[in-house]
Image (spheres, rainbow, N blue to C red):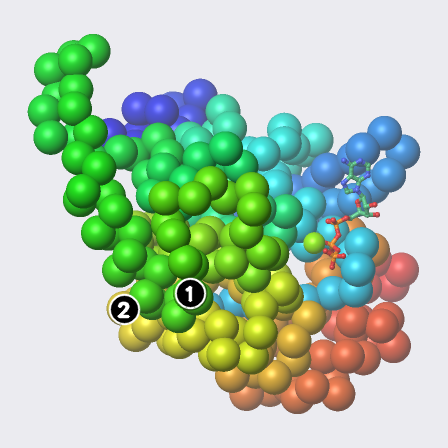
Amino acid sequence: MASDIQTDISGADAPAPSAPLGDVILRTEGLTKHYGGVHALVDCNFEIRKGEHVAIMGDNGAGKSTFVRQITAVEKRTAGKVWFNGQYVDFDGPLAAREAGIETVFQTLALADHLDVPDNLFLGREIRKFNLGPFSILDYKAMREATKRGLERTGVKIPNIRNTIQNMSGGQRQCVAIARTATFHSKLTIMDEPTAALGVQETAQVENIIRTLKEQGEPLILISHNMRQVMDLCDRIVVWRRGRICANLRKEDTDGEDVVAYITGAKTQPEYDTAA
Ligand SMILES: Nc1ncnc2c1ncn2[C@@H]1O[C@H](COP(=O)(O)OP(=O)(O)OP(=O)(O)O)[C@@H](O)[C@H]1O
Ligand SMILES: [Mg+2]
């Protein structure tokens, strides 16, 4: 199902990666995004393997969310190549990325304000009782029950899931978006600062969801400014600075102080040192 929508370059015309993909679930080569004269993302070579949890860290404006918007096709990349799940991809838009198996919690949440919680969760993949071409009947009860189960996993209390999203708090909205990722199994989950707006208890619940993804072998890209969280939850940390990757660190080879040195520019790994 996914293969017929996810790429507009297929078969023999698809570019080959510079090295075999093996168990890589996502790889970018030379990924670049310019906004006019702003070089928000420059020549990024990134990869994540099946089952891995990788943190992306970097100062405000470093290019982290821009990276996410290019791999999920919210925007058209300026240059560079992307492979996902063994195939070269150039998605038409975020829905195509989602249908191919990339589930994303965006920093600026992509929720539909005028819809209630179940409608937001199931937007674009409604559960149907019957499906006869244009005539189909949606199974609202099944969707409401699945929504409640998803929300229970985030621990957030939402008084009435039939209310529209627009009057909810930032934390409640964030939990709805995270419940969406917890409800549908994906090939890759991306969370851009998922707990930034959450209280202590909700943060702990979301961290548990992330641990469950790890136990289930589901790969995750986690963007976070929270060093404790990153050290607790991730196998590897990739640091961005001024649009470029400046370090790729295995957790066991680094510590908080070391990561901060890369974030601030006090250190750059030799292989990423463009001035050298
Ligand atoms: N639509 C846009 N038009 C112009 N410049 C943009 C646009 N989107 C992002 N930028 C610029 O690109 C750079 C990277 O922004 P980005 O949002 O990716 O940073 P970030 O690392 O996610 O930061 P934060 O930690 O604050 O979320 C910034 O300088 C930002 O101002
Ligand atoms: Mg961001």
- Tell me the residue at 68%/45% (across/down): 66
What is the secondary structure assignment of the residue under circle 2?
loop
First reached walking from the N terminus: tag 1 or tag 2: 1
Residue bearing mark 1:
157
- Tell me the residue at 16%/19% (across/down): 136
Q: Position of residue 78 (x, y in %)?
A: 70, 31
Residue 53 shown left or right of residue 144 in the figure: right
Residue 259 shown left or right of residue 54 in the figure: right
Q: Is residue 30 visible?
A: no
Q: Position of residue 70 (x, y in %)?
A: 61, 39
- Real-space Cα distance between discs 1 and 2? 26 Å
In this orientation, which residue lies closer to the viewer: 272 or 262?
262
Q: Which mark is residue 216?
A: 2
Q: Nearer the viewer, mark 1 or mark 2?
A: 1
Q: Is residue 137 visible?
A: yes
Q: Position of residue 7 (x, y in %)?
A: 42, 27
Q: Is residue 37 above or below residue 159?
A: above
What is the secondary structure assignment of the residue under circle 1?
loop
Q: Is residue 225 above or below residue 33?
A: below
Q: Position of residue 217 (x, y in %)?
A: 30, 67
In this orientation, which residue lies closer to the viewer: 141 or 259?
141
* Amino acid at the residue labelled 1: Lys
- Tell me the residue at 89%/60% (across/down): 275
